[in-house]
Image (tube, rainbow, N blue to C red):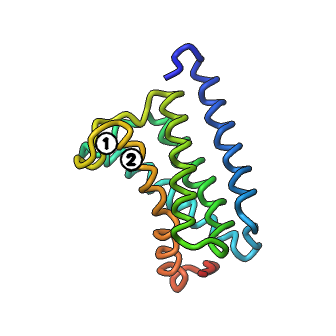
Amino acid sequence: MIPTLPLELRVGVVLALYALLTVVTVAIASRRAEPEERRTAAVIGGIWAPAVFLGNYAFYRVGLMSFLPWLNNFLHTFLWIGGCLTVLYMGVRKDLGLIEQGLVFALLSFIVKVAERALFGIWEHAHFFWVFPGEWAYIVGWSLADGLYPVLTLWGIRILAGRVSGIVAV
């Protein structure tokens, strides 16, 4: 952790990182969400962000994750996962295969977790799912889990497309 920096500056740095990675994701994405897809994007982010926010705390309670302080958990889940990853997904979902999407999501999530660890001292845990020991296994494991975002989102959209108006399934 970089303890010499004030909290406000560390939050600013992580927000700048999210912004930079959003620019990178827009550059990676060969397309933007069309107007008819904006509701789909809003639903995706609106489901992922609170679900992961609550899931992170639940996983902490059962010993699968370290505690993410509320501010860090909020920034990570609502801005990074609900915002940035949704923008990335909407931009690459038609152009990259699911494996390629998963690799991009996992790599960018790894960068975010390493930065958040350095800035806030989070993402430190003794194991990943009690199977893989070590803090780096924990970070890599959760980054790879973030790589499942595209396939889980695809399945979720297909389920919701018939039930929620305005959802555009690919």
Residue 161: which disc? none
Circle 2 crowding by C-alpha within 10 Å: few under 14, some 14–19, many from 20:
some
Q: Which residue is mark 1?
A: 60
Tell me the residue at 57%/50% (across/down): 108
Residue 111 found in image quarter: top right
Residue 56: which disc? 2
Instruction: Identify which residue, 34 or 101, lies in the foreground.
Output: 101
Q: Position of residue 134 (x, y in %)?
A: 31, 37
Q: Position of residue 133 (x, y in %)?
A: 27, 41
Tell me the residue at 55%/35% (across/down): 115
* Amino acid identity at mark 2: Asn
Q: Position of residue 90 (x, y in %)?
A: 65, 67
Q: How many dots with numbers?
A: 2
Q: Position of residue 56 (x, y in %)?
A: 38, 47
Q: Secondary structure at mark 1?
A: helix
Circle 1 crowding by C-alpha within 10 Å: few under 14, some 14–19, many from 20:
some
Residue 20 found in image quarter: top right
Does the residue at mark 2 contact the one at mark 1 (Cβ under 8 Å)?
A: yes
Q: Left or right: where does residue 20 sit relative to residue 123? A: right
Q: Left or right: where does residue 126 sit relative to residue 14? A: left
Residue sitting at the far bottom: 162
* Amino acid identity at mark 1: Tyr
Measure the C-alpha gap from mark 2 to mark 1.
Answer: 6 Å
Residue 40's place in the image compared with 128, above or below, is: below
Q: Secondary structure at mark 2?
A: helix
Residue 170 found in image quarter: bottom right
Tell me the residue at 51%/78% (across/down): 160
Tell me the residue at 48%/32% (across/down): 117
